[in-house]
Image: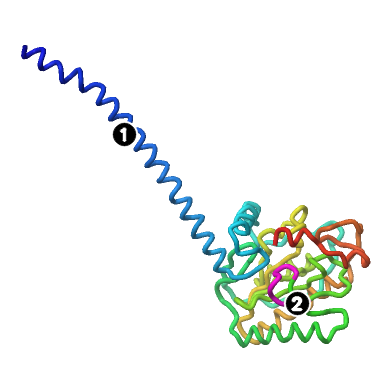
Amino acid sequence: MLELHDALPLTSAAPLDGVSKLKMAKLGVAFIAIAIILPFLLYIYYDYLAFISLGPGGTPPTLAGFLRVELLGFFALRNPYTAAEAPERLKGQPGYLDSLEKRLPPRPHTRGIAPHRQITQKASKDDFERLASAIKSMGASNPNLLIGTSCFEKHGTGLFSISPAKRTCKGEICHAHPSDGSLHLTLHPADAKTVLEAGWGERHPIARGGWFERFVPGGFIMCYAPRDEREVETVLRIVRAAAWFVSGGDGVVDVGEGRRDSGYCSATDVSEEVSGYASIL
């Protein structure tokens, strides 16, 4: 009797062990899933907060806008400080800037795609007012230029060419960001190289040329915020270079009329709206 009694618990315990192991396996899978998914959700959450913290820009501050920018992030430039190769039609052609004095390092930190902002070494209120006032005066004093709401940003003030030879979202030459004092502008490849090598700016994260010119021009550059009155003058030289290029300075060649991106276009074509920019930025 003792031997039979001793054997019964062993027989009844076997199914319980199986159930217990199954529960443990399920708990293990659930724990692993949480360990993987939770950090990912936290990353998305904090990335979204960082996107919102950049302030108003061309992309709506919504979840859909955030996801759009996240998708573009997969195609962002790995090294925005190196100049792009010039298109065949502009190779060997000089830009507007003969030279540019070196900007004292270090470079500021930047973040984002749309909006794309400078988050350190921001301009003081006085320096930004000097810069913004000079750009407005440039637009008011030149019959070929005008001031309006930025086509790219849709919030800030932009400088435009009345008769652009380079399609840059309705002929936009540049726009300044009041939140940090930086600018975005479109430059001749030679001038973009000069600005990058002198440390005054960086390429926009998706200024890759080719198919991406549906979003921003290939020569789309962030020019860093001026840190003093002398640097304001240097930044204004870069703005004048952008105005020269977009307005059709020497060396700018017109090509096919049928394009709807930021490529070159004819004088009759420039008045048509570029819908591609609005759809993304």
Query: For numbered disc 2, what is the local secondary structure?
Result: helix
Coloration mode:
rainbow
State left or right for residue 118 relative to residue 272: left
* Residue found 86% across the figure and 70% down from its top: 164
Please name whichever residue, 203 or 21, is drawn nearer the observer in this view of the structure: 21
Q: Quadrant of residue 28?
A: top left
Q: Amino acid at mark 2?
A: Val
Q: Is residue 113 above or below residue 30?
A: below
Label 1 element class = helix
Q: Mark 1 or 2 closer to N-term?
A: 1
Q: How far from the left and from the top, in percent, is residue 50?
A: 53, 64
Q: Quadrant of the C terminus?
A: bottom right
Viewer-side residue, 252 vs 185: 185
Secondary structure mostly seen in the magenta stretch: loop
- Give residue 55's position: percent from left, percent from top: 59, 70
**10 Å crowding of disc 1: few (<14), some (14-19), many (20+):** few
Split into 4 quadrants, where in the image is the N terminus? top left
Q: Nearer the viewer, residue 187 or 169?
A: 169
Instruction: Kindly identify which residue carries mark 1.
Output: 24
- Residue mark closest to the camera, 1 vs 2: 1
Residue drawn at the location 15% of the way across and 20% of the way down: 9
Number of marks drawn: 2
Q: Residue furthest left?
A: 2
Q: Quadrant of residue 134?
A: bottom right
Residue 239: image tag: 2
Q: Quadrant location of residue 29? A: top left
Whole-percent x and y of residue 72? 65, 54
Q: Which residues are magenta?
A: 151-159
